[in-house]
Structures are given as structure tokens and as C-alpha cells.
Image (tube, helix red, strand yellow):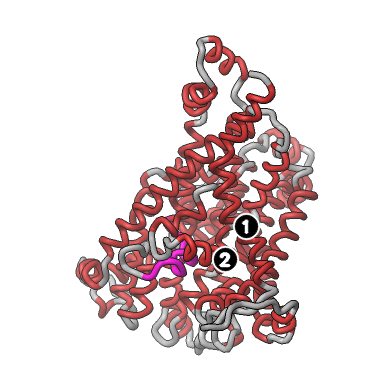
Amino acid sequence: MNKSMQAVYGWLLLLPAIVLLAAFTHYPALSTLWHSFFSTPRGSRPAHFVGLENYALMRDDPVFWQALWNNLWFALGTIPASIVIALIMALWVNRSLAGRGFLRMAYFTPTVLPMVAVANIWLFFYTPQYGLIAQVLHAFGIPGTNWLGSRDTALPALMLVTIWKEAGFFMIFYLAALQTVSPSLREAALLEGASRWQYFRRVLWPLLMPTTLFVLVNALINAFRLVDHVVVMTRGGPDNASTLLLYYIYQVGFSFWDTSYAATLTVVLLLILSITALVKFRWLDRKTHYQ
Amino acid sequence: MTQKLDTLGAWLLGLLWILPLAYAVWAAFHPPAYATRFDLQAPLTLENFSRAWHAAPFPRYFLNTFFLVTMVLAAQLVLSTLAGYAFARFEFRGRDLVFMLVLLQLMIMPDVLLVENYRSMSWLGVRDTIFAVGLPYFASAFGIFLLRQTFKTVPRELEEAARVEGAGPLQILWKVYVPLAKPIYVAYGLVSVSHHWNNFLWPLIITNSVESRPLTVGLQVFSATDQGIDWSVITAATLLSAAPLLIGFLLFQRQFVQSFMRAGIR
């Protein structure tokens, strides 16, 4: 096949995917930016150019800052915890413990369940007085609180659900990586008199680094992308204590119908994701390979 | 000794992890009086399931979700195969740039572009349809990437052999590449189906009627409005909506885990 035929075939094969990808990823990303400079059309008044007015509004909007901070705390609270738990799970399941099959199933099950469904179950766990946590605490004589109803505990309660949901998913990647590690490495290290911790710290952890980075990026994206549990469990409350950026966008866009302001908020979210993407492409992909 | 401690720790964590599911099973299979009282003598019942099934149009929601995941998967398989083939085996100017633009979708997913995609769907006049729920996901960067990597590992000699017999590019794709990538298709299919079975926020926004709502949204509407705090019925509905995936997972556990592994290593 000659060169120009190659090009014709190549573009024809790409065409359907490219058109749809551009229509529902690239175009909306750009039009979000465009619309953030306009006012929201209301009734008979069409949208008009307002410059940076929406951004000024955002700068002075305490709920936006709260959502942003909450989201950063949410990422900081969930990502390291789920990575550590995932790694421990993988190390356990990779060995011949009694009941390994059951354990792997137990760890992984949350991944296949819909977030909406499990959020409903956790909703019951957190219910004051007769919820499961309240009952267990009561049995030990400890007074419980309204976990989802108080400002201090609402966001941590959501974090716990997220860690529970994601750890098993990340475990899979560690498990895959661990299975490529030759057992002779372990034998050699132990023969040299290394303790288990030293073997982990000096041999396994560096070998698992690419996996950790990969999981880290995925976890970061998920922290800004997944708000199903916020919708089901707290609706951002109480008093915006558990609102996350995407949930706030959803509220502004589809409860208050202020589409321009929602677009402005989306620009911030896209900025965060773009930085993540940049870090990934520049820094991560030198270690993993895209060829 | 350490082996015993490890086993103990692993089991404690495992039990903790399975607890929410175990509780849901408990509450769903016992009368409402036992939803928050744990008594081994409690009678078993299927009453909650039939109440949930009749309290909301769950059969319709099931049908919608089934239709949705089938449509999305079919579109994704076709589009990703064609595009992956182009990226793996055709040389043309601008290919690498386009590939980078495709990969961008791994970071910026349609999930976060709610407002603009809603606008596009209104413009297309397809709001509140199952088609609109699936449409933004038809072209999948992840699928394109996965198949490109797979097709690249296919030895060129196989392609040459087919070409000598007079096969065109599409025939080569269909006869040589697709059969060799079968495990990847299975892996991708499982990941895609479980993702779209569970997807929630976009369908919540774009659908507004029983005819187009998938299960996840139906479940939320049901438990948020109709039931108050009847945990037995809510857990029964929850289990119902997760059941097909859950049963599939329990039956084909190994394939599920391996698929997520395969799809994840990139």
C-alpha cells in the first residue's frame, strides 16, 4: 500500500471515533471556557459578554472556596489511605494465606457494586441511634453522634466510604505488579539477612513505584470526578461542609440553573485535571511506556 | 507466628470489607422488624424484594440499563477497533498529534463536562433518552489505547500472509487482528459494562422519565423519595440493582480480576 493510500485509510478508520471524541470531550472543554465569559441567558434576555465578571463572582463566593478546600482535603484524606490499604491487601492476597480466595473476593467486591447502591447501605451505617455504628458504639457505652449531620464528621464519613470503595480496585494493580516480581529476589534478600521490612523497603517498594504513580494519578482523577456518594448521602451538607467541586457544579448548573457560573467553575476543575494530565505525561510516562 | 498474625489481620480486614454487603443481605432477607435488630432466630423472607419490585418500575429500569450498557459497549468496540487499528498499523502525517488528543480523554472525561454536554444534547433534541446517556461514551480513549497496544504486538508476518491471499485492510483487521485480541475484548467489555452499569451523575442529569432512567438513577429516586427510612425495602432494591453484576462477578471472579488487571496495566 502506498503512502497516500495509507493516509486515506488511516483517517477514514479514525473518523468516527475522532468526531465523537471531539464533539463530547474537546468541544465541550473549549466551549466551557467560552461560556464562562458570558452571562446566563434568562427569559427574554440572551447571553451577553461579561468579561471576567463570573470569575470575580467566583473569587468572592465562599461556597466555591469551601468546595475547593473540601475537595483537596478529600483527595489528601482518601488517596494515601487507600493506596496503603491496597498495598497491604495485595501483599496479603499474593501469599498463600488460608482462605485467599474469599479474601480476594471480599476486598474486590466494593469495586463492582454501584456507588449509589453502597452509599445507601452506608447511609444506614451512619444513621444516628439505630444505625450500625451507633449500635456498636452503644454496646461499648460510647455516645455516638450524627455522623452525616454534623459539620466535623460529614466529610470524613464520605472519605471512609471512598477508601472502602477504592482500595480493592487499586489492590488489583499492585497484585498484578507483585506477580511479576521474581520470588528469588525475596530468597536472596532473606539469605542476606534482611528483615521483612527491609525487603519491602529496599526491594519491593522501588519495584512497585511505577504502579504507585499510576494508582496515584487514577486516584487523583477519581477524587475530582466521583460525587455519587455526595448526592446520595449528604447533598453537600450540612452547611456545605461536605460539598465537593463537581457536586457544586452540579448544584449551580442543574438546581440553580446558572449555566455560566457552572461553566466558570468547570474551568477550575478542568485546570486541575489538566495539571494532573501534564504531570502524568511529562513525568510518569518516562517510566511507563506509551510506545 | 507472623504467618498467623498476617492471616488474622487479613481476615479482620476482609470481614470489615464485606460487612456492608453482609448487612444488606441481612436486612433484605429478613422482615423489617429485624432490619436493625440482629437475632439469629429471625425468620427469612423474600417479601422485601417483591415489595421493592412492585413499588417502583424496576423491570423498566433493568431494561433501560441493559439496553444502555449493550449500546455503549457495541459502539465502543467498533469505534475503538477501527481507531486502534489506524493508530497501530497506518503511517500518516499528524497521527501522533491526534493520538495525544485522544489520550487527553483519559484525564478529562465526559463525566465532568456536565453543563456543556447537557447543552449539546438539548441542541440535538435527544435529551431524556437512553441514547443521550450513552452517546458521550461511544468514543473511548481507553478502548482505543488498549487495542492499539494489543494490535502493535501482532507479528507483521501474519498480516503479510493474509495480504498475499488478497485480503484488504478491513478483511485483515477482521480475520487477523480481531481474533488475536479476544482476551483484551473480554477484559475491556467487563470493565466497560461494570462502569456504565454503575454510572450515575450524567444519567441523573440527562434523564427525566421512567422510560429512559437507568437502574442507578431509578434506585436513587426510589430510596430518596418513596420510602422514608424503610431499610428493608431499600436494601432489597439496592441488592436487586447490583445483583446482575454481583452474581456475574461471583461466578466469573477470576476473569473479572484478570480483566481489571489486564485493562489496568498500560
Q: Amino acid at mark 2?
A: Glu
At horizontal 75% and vertical 49% (from top left) the residue drawn is A281
Disc number for residue B116: 2
- The answer to whether B203 is drawn above or below residue B225 in the figure is above
Is-magenta flag for residue B204?
yes
Indicate the quadrant containing the N terminus of chain A: top left, top right, bottom left or bottom right: top right
| Chain of the residue displaying label 1 | A
Q: Amino acid at mark 1?
A: Tyr
- Image coordinates for residue B259, horizontal then vertical, percent: 50, 42
Q: Give neighbour class at mark 1: few <14, some 14-19, many 20+ (Cα, 10 Å).
A: some
| Chain of the residue displaying label 2 | B
Give the prevailing secondary structure in the magenta stretch: helix
At horizontal 53% and vertical 79% (from top left) the residue drawn is A257
- Image coordinates for residue A287, horizontal then vertical, percent: 77, 43
At horizontal 31% and vertical 62% (from top left) the residue drawn is B61
Proximity of marks 1 and 2: CB atoms separated by less than 8 Å? yes
Disc number for residue B64: none
Stretch in magenta: B197-208
- Image coordinates for residue A126, horizontal then vertical, percent: 47, 79
Disc number for residue A27: 1
Is A115 left or right of B229, judged from the image as shown? right
Residue A156 seen in render: no
Toward the top, the furthest residue is B164
Front residue of A115 and B90: B90
